[in-house]
Image (cartoon, helix red, strand yellow):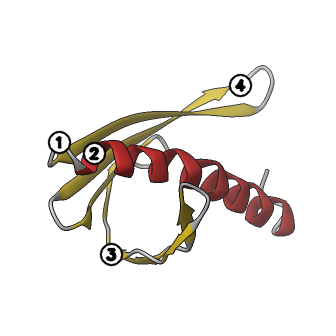
Amino acid sequence: YHVNESLKLWGLIPMKPSYDVEVTIIEPERHIHYKSEVSKGVLLEIDYTFVENKNSNEVKIVEAIMLKGYPIIIPISIGLFKKSRPLLFDSIRKELEKNKIY
């Protein structure tokens, strides 16, 4: 997959990172692995595990996040990552509601 993002570093500096992502289904409908070099020298890996509560018909998403790279760049990447996560999940929620998949 190819990802194009748009965000502001420290709320001021516009950034539009663009990068390729490798998504691997480890266990269908239960576990996905996401791997990408989000910028030069910064590797992001995320494991998404979907835990279904059959009693409440709810699904909990558990994220395990690993960020590797140059020590100077990692704090900046973490800041950007923290800003982008809520946007991603909000986008997923809206798409699910729009398509009545919830």
For marks 2 and 4, give the one nearer the viewer.
Answer: 2
In this view, which residue lies farthest toward the top? 55
Instruction: Tell me: residue 80, above or below residue 56.
Output: below
Element assignment for label 1: loop
Residue 35 shows in the view:
yes
Residue 61: assigned label: none
Label 1 and label 3: CA atoms lie apart by 20 Å
Give the Cα distance between marks 2 and 4. Answer: 39 Å
Residue matched to label 3: 19
Q: Give the residue type that dot 2 points to.
A: Ile
> Which numbered circle lies on residue 71?
1
State how far apart marks 1 and 4 are (Cα).
43 Å
Instruction: Tell me the number on the disc at residue 74.
Output: 2
Q: Position of residue 69 (x, y in %)?
A: 16, 48
Residue neighbourhood size for the residue with mark 4, other residues' Cα within 10 Å, grouped as few (<14), some (14–19), many (≥20): few
Image coords of residue 52 (percent x, y): 62, 30
Q: Could you tell which of marks 1 and 4 lies nearer the N-terminus?
A: 4
x 57%, y 50%: residue: 83
Say few, some or many: other residues with alpha carbon within 10 Å of mark 3 (under 14 / 14 to 19 / 20 or more).
some
> Is residue 32 visible to the viewer in this orientation of the structure?
no
Residue under label 4:
54
